[in-house]
Image (cartoon, rainbow, N blue to C red):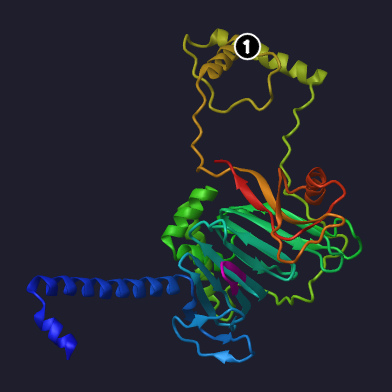
């Protein structure tokens, strides 16, 4: 009653002021709800695309309905059948797509995101660089790829070995031999593939990498399909790798036509691999770098060759004497190299030397890696280190002999201390 009386007693100006304040409060509440909703969507894992047979497992072993935009919880797993395909948006800038006969598990804690491929293959596309406090790792049975903003294809090769193709950007790969405990690191760039080889008959070098350059036609059908469907991704991949855009599209069309002509054959057959059973290559399987063709050796000069050259020169002199003032050069070059150049050949060589060489086409700009930060836990004798203590970041110049280089750096910080590498190296880029 008193409140109603006060309202009636208010002047018109006071009523206007109170109305404006009330509207401001309502608007602020609406904006907060919208921003909260947008943040929720941006950081929520959700299903974006489904084709064929797809199944979602929850962390309790049950199943979830397969509907558009259904949320993924940490611990959920995604399965695709022989005719299946599924894309998951991990947030607004990270999308992974499982091909047929594949399985992946999703784990998320704050800004730490992990995806474990236990079967088949997947394509990933990260459109924005991760912030300093974010991590995104894709794991297989023995390999971990630290993703910072790139695209690529993770799969098991025909022998069941962990493999990865990077189509743009740089990825740091970590491989661990579960039998020996040895850990090694490698850097893979766009336009390269890597395969992990494990050996059980040794304790040193029981982990080996085979890194090779790949071209458009070397890509399997599935990553070709994923790239060709996204014009922005095509441009990004071609700019980074130097691949030809039209050749990439032609390779994708040819692969799709081959699959269409043989509908009973799956897009890219991928062997099954379990995390507890990693196939080991035999001792004779040793990764070797691609060979560079050696130049053809120059023919040795013999007395017979010299006599032949002299005879040819004599004939050439006689021919010039009987020729017109402006002789017409022959179109077919002489196959035998001339060891004694004539005056005409000398002038030709000099003119070629003075001609400016063509300017090479500029290559796409690329961030240069100048080193790596490695997270380690340092254990000093007599001091207690808790599990929640922050790691110490050690800078090294190369991933080669990583543990030895980290050990030298730790010895300078704390002589006599031991250490454990607790995470993957992170590249340091030139500013």
Q: Is residue 210 visible?
A: no
55 in relation to 165, above or below: below
- Dividing the picture into quarters, in which one does residue 386 lie? bottom right
Front position in the image: 17 or 165 = 17
> Which residue is most to the front?
2
In the image, 318 versus 74, the foreground residue is: 74
Q: Position of residue 178 (x, y in %)?
A: 82, 68
Please give the range of residues in magenta: 108-114
Give how far across and how far down residue 7 sits, in percent. Answer: 13, 82
Around disc 1, counting alpha carbons within 10 Å, would you say few (fewer than 14), some (14 to 19), or many (20 or more)?
A: few
Q: Residue at x 49, y 58 (%)?
A: 128
The x and y percentages for residue 196 are: 75, 61
Looking at the rendered image, the quarter that the N terminus falls into is bottom left
Residue occupying the point 60% across, 9% down: 343
Residue 369 position (above or below residue 419): above
Nearest to the observer: residue 249 or residue 185: 185
Query: Is residue 350 inside the magenta stretch?
Result: no
| Residue designated by label 1 | 342
Magenta-colored segment: predominant secondary structure = strand
Q: Position of residue 304 (x, y in %)?
A: 80, 20
Residue 90 seen from this side: yes
Q: Residue at x 77, y 21 (%)?
A: 305
């Amino acid at each position: 009653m008193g409140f109603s009386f006060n309202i009636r007693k208010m002047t018109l100006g006071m009523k206007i002021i109170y109305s404006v304040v009330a509207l401001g409060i309502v608007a602020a509440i609406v904006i907060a709800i919208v921003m909260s909703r947008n943040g929720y969507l941006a950081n929520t894992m959700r299903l974006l695309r489904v084709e064929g047979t797809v199944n979602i497992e929850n962390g309790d072993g049950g199943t979830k309905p397969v509907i558009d935009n259904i949320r993924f919880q940490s611990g959920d797993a995604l399965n695709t059948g022989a005719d299946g395909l599924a894309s998951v948006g991990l947030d607004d800038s990270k999308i992974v797509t499982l091909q047929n006969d594949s399985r992946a598990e999703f784990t998320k804690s704050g800004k730490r995101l992990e995806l474990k491929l236990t079967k088949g293959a997947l394509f990933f596309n990260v459109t924005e660089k991760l912030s300093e406090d974010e991590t995104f790792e894709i794991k297989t049975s023995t390999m971990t790829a630290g993703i910072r903003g790139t695209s690529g294809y993770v799969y098991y090769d025909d022998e069941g070995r962990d493999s990865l193709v990077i189509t743009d950007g740089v990825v740091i790969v970590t491989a661990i031999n579960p039998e020996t405990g040895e850990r090694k690191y490698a850097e893979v760039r766009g336009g390269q593939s890597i395969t992990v080889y494990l050996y059980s008959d040794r304790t040193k070098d029981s982990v080996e990498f085979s890194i090779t350059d790949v071209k458009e036609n070397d890509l399997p059908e599935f990553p070709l399909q994923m790239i060709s469907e996204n014009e922005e991704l095509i441009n990004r991949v071609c700019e980074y790798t130097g691949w030809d855009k039209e050749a990439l599209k032609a390779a994708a069309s040819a692969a799709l036509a081959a699959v269409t002509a043989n509908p009973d054959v799956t897009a890219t057959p991928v062997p099954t691999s379990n995390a507890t059973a990693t196939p080991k290559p035999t001792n004779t399987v040793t990764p070797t770098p691609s060979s560079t063709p050696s130049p053809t050796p120059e023919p040795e000069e013999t007395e017979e060759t010299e006599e032949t050259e002299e005879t040819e020169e004599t004939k050439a002199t006689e021919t010039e004497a009987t020729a017109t003032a402006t002789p017409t050069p022959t179109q077919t070059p002489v196959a035998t190299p001339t060891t004694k150049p004539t005056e005409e050949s000398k002038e030709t060589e000099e003119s070629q030397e003075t001609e400016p060489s063509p300017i090479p086409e500029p290559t796409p700009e690329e961030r240069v890696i100048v080193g790596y930060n490695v997270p380690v836990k340092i254990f000093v004798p007599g001091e207690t280190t808790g599990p929640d203590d922050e790691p110490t970041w050690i800078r090294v110049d190369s991933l080669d002999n990583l543990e030895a280089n980290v050990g030298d750096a730790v010895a300078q910080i704390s002589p006599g201390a031991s250490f454990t590498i607790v995470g993957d190296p992170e590249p340091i880029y030139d500013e």
